[in-house]
Amino acid sequence: MPVHTPAPYPAARLRRLRRTAALRDLVAEHRLAPADLIWPVFIREGEGVEEAVPSMPGVARLSLDMLRRKAEAAHALGITTICLFPYTAQELRTEDCAEAWNPENLTNRAIRMLKADLPGLSVMTDIALDPYNINGHDGFVVEGEIVNDETVQALVKMALAQAEAGADILGPSDMMDGRIGAIRLALESAGHRGVAILSYAAKFASGFYGPFRDAVGASGRLVGDKKTYQIDPANRAEALRCIARDLDEGADMVMVKPGMPYLDICRAAKDEFGLPVCAYQVSGEYAMLQAAAQMGWLDGEKVMLESLLAFRRAGCDAILTYFAPEAARALRG
Ligand code: PBG
């Protein structure tokens, strides 16, 4: 972008266009709208249940009837997409993770319910084995190793079950090699030609996922860390290579995750590939802002909206954020 050298003062006074709200709005370079937000929601069994997640103030695990109510309200606020994360009953977490591709599992039932009751709302899913795995990993663990190809086969089964249930967007978040190509091929073969894949292509091995693991009940279980499959936070070129690879394999959109500490990756992804880029403002980012707001150290609404606008400025088309309903409400004034 050519940057014109401003005329010298006083011909140029940059404050002229900052003088009033109307002038500032007129020249605002980026905007945030409820339609840009994807709302990640934790779901659980039961009825009338809204179970608070202590490390994520304001976030609760919802039973499906509550999900329906809250999804309807979010949709009415202009949110277009909900992303489901299951809190799987403890007895259904096994080494073979079979619950992950059960057509009647919690997520698949939630997809069917939402698509029947709110057809205008897009439903996104997560594809990874961690909510179903006895050891909290995203893939099968064999003799201490997270095995790639066997995991990809399981992820394909999971993807097909979700597509069958009516999911609009599948979100593989597992970071196994080759999963996008395998899922795309299986979807095409099964006739699911319109199902979009939002690949978590640039997913870093981050400390900011802690509260999420509490929310899905994986924290106590996780053995070791995820560094053999998620990207080293030191690596930018590798993240771009992952994005290029996933696009070649059939991803429609890509995710950068976490968000705020990785805005440089968002910008690079947008500039290099020009495709829809999403950022995930993850649980730890949410928790930090909420905690500081609760202490009275930050103005919660201001930093919420500022942090979300930053993603738009960095080139993101959409943002996954636990703030989605609150932000949509604030944006609508
Ligand atoms: C797991 C998954 C994680 C998140 C989304 N999907 C956690 C992890 O990789 O350990 C994190 C989201 C967040 O922190 O908000 N496949």
Image (spheres, grey):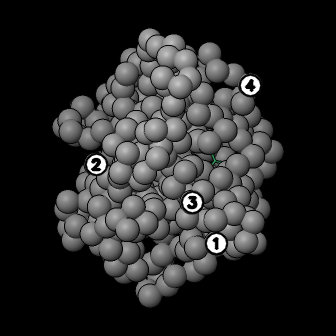
Provide the residue designation for mark 2. Answer: 168
Quadrant position of residue 232: top right
> Mark 1 is on which residue type?
Pro
First reached walking from the N terminus: tag 1 or tag 4: 1
Provide the residue designation for mark 4. Answer: 234
Q: Secondary structure at mark 2?
A: loop
Q: CA distance from mark 1 to mark 2?
A: 29 Å
Residue occupying the point 67% across, 38% down: 261
> Mark 4 is on which residue type?
Ala
Residue 223, position as x, y percentages in the image: 78, 49
Q: Is mark 4 within 8 Å of ligand 1?
A: no
Q: CA distance from mark 3 to mark 4?
A: 30 Å
Q: CA distance from mark 4 to mark 2?
A: 33 Å
Asked if disc 3 and disc 4 are in contact, CB closer than 8 Å, the reply is: no
- Could you say which is closer to the camera, residue 208 or residue 163? 208
First reached walking from the N terminus: tag 1 or tag 2: 1
User: Which of the numbered marks, if any, corresponds to residue 57?
Assistant: 1
Q: Is residue 178 left or right of residue 282?
A: left
Q: Secondary structure at mark 4?
A: loop
Q: Is mark 2 within 8 Å of ligand 1?
A: no
Q: How many marks?
A: 4
Q: Residues within 10 Å of mark 2 (few under 14, many from 20)?
A: some
> Mark 3 is on which residue type?
Lys
Q: Residues within 10 Å of mark 3 (few under 14, many from 20)?
A: few
Foreground mark, 3 or 2, reads 3
Relative to 103, residue 181 above or below: above
> Mark 2 is on which residue type?
Asp
